[in-house]
Image: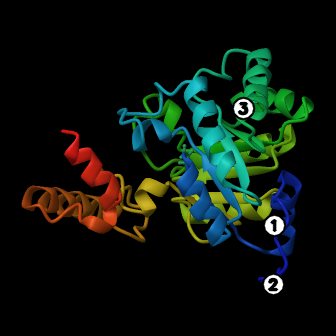
Amino acid sequence: MTTAAEKRAKLTAPAIRQMKAEGTPVVMVTAYDYPTARAVEAAQLEAILVGDSLGMVVLGYESTVPVTMDDMIHHTRAVMRGVETVHVVADLPFMSYQISETQAVENAGRLMKEGGADAVKLEGGRTMATKIAAIVSAGIPVMAHIGLTPQTASALGGFKVQGRSLEAAKGVIDDALAVEAAGAYSVVLEAVPRQLAKIITSRLSIPTIGIGAGIECDGQVLVNGDLLGAYDRFTPRFAKRYAELQTVMQDAFRSFADEVRSGAFPTKEHGFAISRDVLEQLEGGM
Ligand code: KIV
């Protein structure tokens, strides 16, 4: 615990991992830009995920599939400029790591070198274990992501809860054990029943960070567009809105437009003046 006078140290991957042993929840939110990163730093959350949810929440795509490495690097750099102590994890986008271990290491390296991230995240369990191991061997911390994996939502039959049947639940447990064995320092559990998340959390030594996975996880993550109410296309059932930013923005834009149209804005205090002397010379010369 730090006092207000004591500055918190930068949170590294080992520090995040250690939080499980200490029983301290890891609180993570997505961010894609400088002002949001500043707000997360001021609020002293532990971690930011520069998620590929960027594609939907900020870039307006229908899914995360079109997001590119260049998109991720661009937004990770903006976030890094806004944080001091918050741990920043950058998502490897669709098809930037699935092809080979070499491709996975190269692109994870780009997020670290060019983006400045503290760690990378990728989606997949047993099938991605060799990619996780290769990236970790290169000295890059990996956060895994299992359960509902949005990049492959079409193969999963849509954005559906995972691990409800006995067989499917065993599969998610095997995925969790596989990513831990491969060297991941934490794992996101998305849209799995809370009882299954509890079993997984008790069997792993690395922190589980839940989104739609119940209270028993070692931490929680939410997409900021859902949390802030800025993304108004839909809100998943598992997200809680803590603000209504889309309404706040619309109201502010309407007020601005009304004042411009009525002549109420700008007033003198929003502008600049020249001295009477200069003005007289200016007008005299015309
Ligand atoms: O991209 C993202 O925002 C994510 C979260 C849903 C965990 O992966």
Quarter location, residue 175: top right
- Which residue lies under the disc numbered 2? 3
Quarter residue 236 falls in: bottom left
Q: Which residue is painted at 65% across and 39% down in the image?
A: 77
Q: Residues within 10 Å of mark 2 (few under 14, many from 20)?
A: few
Instruction: Check mark 1 vs ligand 1: CB closer than 8 Å? yes or no.
Output: no
* N-terminal-most mark, 3 or 2: 2
Can residue 170 be seen in this snapshot? Answer: no
Q: Is 226 located above or below residue 152 in the figure? A: below
Left/right of residue 254 with respect to residue 58 in the rendered view = left
Residue matched to label 3 = 111
Residue at 27%, 66% in the rendered image: 268
Residue that numbered label 1 is attached to: 20
- Measured Cα–Cα span from mark 3 to mark 1: 26 Å
Q: Looking at numbered disc 2 in the image, what kind of residue is underneath it? A: Thr
CA gap between label 3 and label 2 equals 33 Å
Name which residue lies at 61% across and 42% down: 78
Q: Sequence-wise, which precedes: disc 2 or disc 1? A: 2
Q: Which image quarter is the C terminus in?
A: top left
